[in-house]
Image (cartoon, helix red, strand yellow):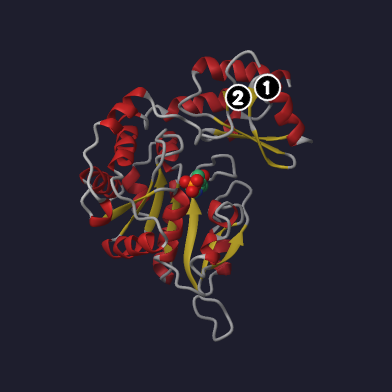
């Protein structure tokens, strides 16, 4: 390849911008295990307030935030219900079982949607001494493996109203909730009001190098803080990372709309109906995903195979309008 490849493998590959690096360099720090890092404390307060919750906890990864969040709702030997291609079910290496003793049952929706009929059918809070007890439902917005699909707020409200009536907790994996917020205009606090605990990532479309946040009640966060340390996730002068995340909140939320426009452009070039592309992820059905990935690479466009017939393209901060145009031309040829 004679030129720098256009990397559409993931929105995690972004590198911090000069402005973000300057914010990181200037961060005031302290020992966060002592609760003395002012930059972390400010970010936690800010993000809790954005979602209308009491408290928040900074974590190195979204997987750890999800593990701590679900652990706060589901005791060992109890279950969480989730969609069958949810990140918590497929892409966290079984952490919820391996590290928290949580079991899962799943419903299946082609676009990762909330299926309240299926969920209420699975729900088993107390079926006697032989059956696992359901104590939480988890949803993912946007849904990664469903191609960045948005969950409509009306469906989340219906889930909230049902969950309140039967007394089951709700967790939201919001790794890309920022994308759903920008795509729909739904306020972050409206999403926050539908759930007991949620997680967000700064390291995806927002372009920070590291960092996620668990958001919930004071009690859930206090407990999660203990478990974060117990699992080896206590961090010290981590304000240098929180500063990158705060910079991303200031500068990189509204611009996600550009990523969404680029994704629609790529979809059109690849024969996918752009109306089916809600945010920054495009999923292609190709007879041989690995061969397609190799052919695109030859032409300087990096994409990933996420199944034998499934290719995923993700737009992000480091893909300019020109890059998107060039990638669209290359992929249209393929
Ligand atoms: C990326 C992602 C996470 C967290 O991933 P980490 O790599 O552990 O930060 C969680 N949920 C979804 C839906 C994701 O896409």
Query: Going by the picture, which residue comes out furthest to the bottom?
Result: 129
Residues 317 and 16: in front is 16
Query: Measured from the top left, where is residue 58 in percent x and y?
Result: 34, 50
Residues 231 and 181: in front is 231
Q: Secondary structure at mark 2?
A: helix
Q: Are marks 1 and 2 in contact (CB under 8 Å)?
A: yes
Residue 320 seen in the current view: yes
Image point (45%, 45%), residue name? 175
Q: Residues within 10 Å of mark 1 (few under 14, many from 20)?
A: some
Question: Does mark 2's beta carbon lie closer than 8 Å to ligand 1?
Answer: no
Number of callouts: 2
Location of mark 2 (residue) = 266
Location of mark 1 (residue) = 331
Query: Measured from the top left, where is residue 42 in percent x and y?
Result: 22, 45
Image point (54%, 40%), residue name? 148
Task: Indicate left or right for 24 with 207 as reference.
Answer: left
Image point (53%, 24%), residue name? 262
Q: Which mark is residue 12?
A: none
């Amino acid at each position: 390849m004679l030129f720098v490849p256009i990397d559409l493998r993931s929105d995690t590959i972004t590198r911090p911008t000069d402005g973000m690096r300057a914010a990181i360099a200037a961060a005031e720090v302290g020992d966060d295990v002592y609760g003395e890092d002012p930059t972390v404390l400010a970010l936690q307060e800010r993000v809790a307030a954005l979602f209308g919750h009491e408290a928040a906890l900074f974590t190195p990864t979204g997987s750890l935030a999800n593990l701590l969040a679900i652990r706060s709702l589901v005791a060992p030997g109890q279950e969480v219900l989730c969609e069958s291609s949810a990140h918590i079910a497929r892409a966290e290496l079984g952490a919820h079982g391996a590290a928290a003793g949580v079991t899962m049952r799943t419903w299946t929706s082609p676009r990762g949607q909330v299926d309240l009929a299926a969920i209420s059918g699975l729900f088993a809070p107390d079926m006697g001494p032989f059956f696992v007890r359901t104590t939480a439902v988890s949803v993912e917005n946007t849904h990664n493996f469903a191609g960045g699909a948005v969950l409509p707020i009306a469906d989340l409200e219906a889930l909230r109203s049902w969950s309140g009536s039967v007394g089951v907790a709700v967790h939201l994996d919001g790794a890309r909730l920022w994308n759903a917020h920008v795509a729909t205009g739904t306020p972050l606090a409206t999403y926050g009001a539908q759930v007991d605990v949620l997680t967000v990532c700064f390291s995806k479309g927002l372009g920070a190098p590291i960092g996620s946040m668990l958001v919930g009640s004071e009690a859930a966060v206090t407990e999660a803080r203990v478990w974060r340390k117990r699992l080896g996730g206590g961090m010290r002068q981590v304000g240098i990372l929180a500063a990158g995340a705060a910079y991303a909140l200031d500068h990189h939320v509204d611009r996600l709309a550009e990523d969404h426009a680029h994704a629609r452009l790529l979809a059109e070039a690849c024969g996918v109906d752009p109306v089916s592309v809600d945010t920054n992820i495009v999923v292609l059905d190709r007879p041989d995903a690995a061969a397609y990935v190799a052919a695109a690479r030859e032409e300087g466009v990096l994409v990933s195979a996420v199944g034998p017939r499934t290719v995923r393209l993700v737009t992000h901060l480091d893909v300019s309008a020109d890059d998107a145009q060039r990638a669209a031309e290359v992929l249209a040829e393929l």
